[in-house]
Image (cartoon, rainbow, N blue to C red):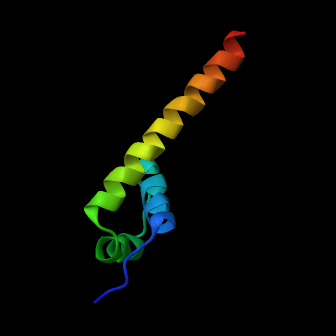
């Protein structure tokens, strides 16, 4: 059985998918090691962090 990927591997996969850039070998490795639940949860957390970062920048500029 293949070793499961951790949070860091899921975070890297989601980060690069935001840009749409990913090597085929890395994609295949992620597809083997990561579960859909890991990718979905990491994607949602990343989206929330991104939204708060954008809001923070907007609030800093608006002051």
- In the rendered image, residue 24, in percent from the top left (x then y), is placed at 36, 72
User: As displayed, is residue 28 above or below residue 19?
Assistant: below
Quadrant in which residue 22 is drawn: bottom left
* Residue shown at the point (72%, 9%) measured from the top left: 63
The residue nearer to you, when weighing 57 against 40, is 40
* Residue shown at the point (37%, 84%) measured from the top left: 3
- In the rendered image, residue 25, in percent from the top left (x then y), is placed at 39, 77
Quadrant in which residue 29 is drawn: bottom left
- In the rendered image, residue 18, in percent from the top left (x then y), is placed at 43, 48
The residue nearer to you, when weighing 28 against 60, is 60
User: As displayed, is residue 39 above or below residue 27?
Assistant: above
The residue nearer to you, when weighing 60 against 17, is 60
- In the rendered image, residue 35, in percent from the top left (x then y), is placed at 29, 67
Residue that extends furthest to the bottom in the rendered view of this protein: 1
User: As displayed, is residue 42 above or below residue 61?
Assistant: below
- Number of numbered discs on residues: 0
Q: Quadrant of the N terminus?
A: bottom left
User: As displayed, is residue 17 above or below residue 23?
Assistant: above
**Is residue 39 found left or right of 7 in the rendered image?**
left
**Is residue 61 found left or right of 34 in the rendered image?**
right
* Residue shown at the point (30%, 71%) measured from the top left: 31
**Is residue 50 found left or right of 38 in the rendered image?**
right
Residue that extends furthest to the top in the rendered view of this protein: 63
* Residue shown at the point (47%, 64%) measured from the top left: 7
């Amino acid at each position: 059985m293949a070793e499961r990927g951790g949070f860091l591997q899921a975070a890297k996969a989601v980060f690069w998918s935001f840009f749409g850039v990913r090597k085929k070998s890395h994609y295949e490795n992620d597809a083997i090691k990561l579960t859909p639940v890991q990718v979905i949860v990491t994607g949602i957390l990343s989206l929330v962090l991104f939204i708060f970062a954008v809001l923070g920048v907007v609030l800093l500029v608006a002051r």
